[in-house]
Image (cartoon, rainbow, N blue to C red):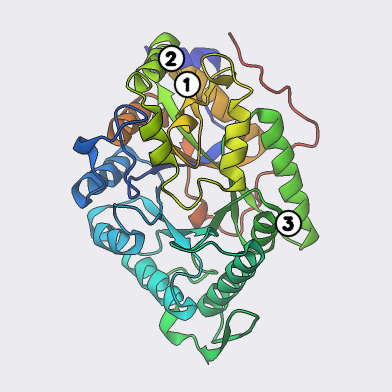
Amino acid sequence: MITEAIKQVGIRTEKRVVEVAWFDDLCGGDTAYLGTVDASRRSNFANCSNIITTADRLGFKNILLPTSYVVGQEVLPFASAMAPLVKNINMLAAIRTGEIHPPMLARHLATLDHILEGRLTVNIINSDLPGLKEDPTMRYKRCEEVIQILKQAWTQDRIEHQGEVYQFSMASDPVKPYQQNGGPLLYFGGISPGSKDVCAKYCDVFLMWPEPEESIYATMQEMSERAASYGRTMDFGMRLHVIVRETEEEAKAYAKQLMSQFDLDTAEKLKHRTQDSKSAGVLRQDEFRKQADEDDYVEPMLWTGIGRARSGCGAAIVGNPEQIIEKMNRYMDMGVRAFILSGYPLKEECEYFGKLVLPHLDTAKLSVVQGRTPAEIPETPLTFGKLKA
């Protein structure tokens, strides 16, 4: 019945091709109720492996493996252990620059790329190193140099780098990846000027968190201009939560259920345990939530209640399958080419999305179409925030 309804409203994504990814719980935030600690969904190997194998079985094209210095699973060992256990899904491994000696980081990632037979993508993270409060200018410089070294290691015969942070002159034979057309794609997110500049210079996909449509569009225009100033183009991705049910009423009721055991003190502790809880991006999510209505909706279908209990991405699109697809299509029409989705609890919501929405999207992996022309950002602004009743 749902499939027929989607066909009738004419929103099947026949000309909108997109990479749809899910999110794994390596950082220990999986829960059935926001603002609570859910002991039944610990970030252990069994739970995390169950999430990624579920996403692989359902046909998601990629999965984000986040990094943070909290109780949970560490990215590279987990990814290496899971590589033989999944069949088709890419892994988007989050790497905080500066934690691993750059030539060895290149070797770690190249080895993982071989184990995955080219199904590796990399999410560059530029936050403070665990236990340190660092100068942002130094972090941006270090991040930039690490990316330069990775690119040299993967594409050149030697690493020849003489920077402010790192100096190397060495052979790159031991660090050649499986992907010989430039190495794994680099995804990057961050709204500070320094972060935006690093991404515009070096990365392939700029990741955004959910905001009102006008704000997203303005960010995409700015980043396209920044990249063009360096003679580059880039793709755009969105990291957001999703709640989908057969009816809009059921979806909104579930959003309320998620908050039904909310404890402010616990939520604050959970939110501020990570390195990015005071980042410009998280503070901006908090500011947008102040514009929301009494039910935490900042625009139709965009629910910001999740940001009360977690750091990072703080909002979810909420609705029935037709509404979710229509909202995703609007983002795609702006130029978004990748989505990294999640919902609570992670495995159960993966099943809902995989059943109700994913079969009606035309999906592809960005990593296997390198050399593509990134999606164009429309010059004429869209009519923002307007969805069918």
Image coordinates of residue 146 in percent, x first then y, are 56, 72
The residue identified by callout 2 is 252
User: Of helix, strand and loop, which one carries label 1?
Assistant: strand
- Image quadrant occupied by the N terminus: top left
Q: Residue at x 43, y 73 (%)?
A: 100
Q: Residue at x 49, y 32 (%)?
A: 307
Q: Please tell me which residue lies in front, 162 or 151.
A: 162
Give the amino acid type for the residue marked by disc 2 in the picture.
Lys
Q: Are marks 1 and 2 in contact (CB under 8 Å)?
A: yes
Q: Quick one: label 3 or label 2, which is nearer the N terminus?
A: 3
The residue identified by callout 3 is 227
Q: Quadrant of residue 60?
A: top left
Q: Please tell me which residue lies in front, 256 or 181.
A: 256
Q: Are marks 3 and 2 in contact (CB under 8 Å)?
A: no
Label ID, residue 104: none
Q: CA distance from mark 1 to mark 2?
A: 7 Å
354 sits left or right of 293 in the view: left
Give the amino acid type for the residue marked by disc 3 in the picture.
Ala
Label ID, residue 318: 1
Q: CA distance from mark 3 to mark 1?
A: 32 Å
Q: Please tell me which residue lies in front, 325 or 384.
A: 384
Marks 3, 2: nearer the viewer: 2
Q: CA distance from mark 3 to mark 2?
A: 39 Å
Q: Residue at x 44, y 62 (%)?
A: 131
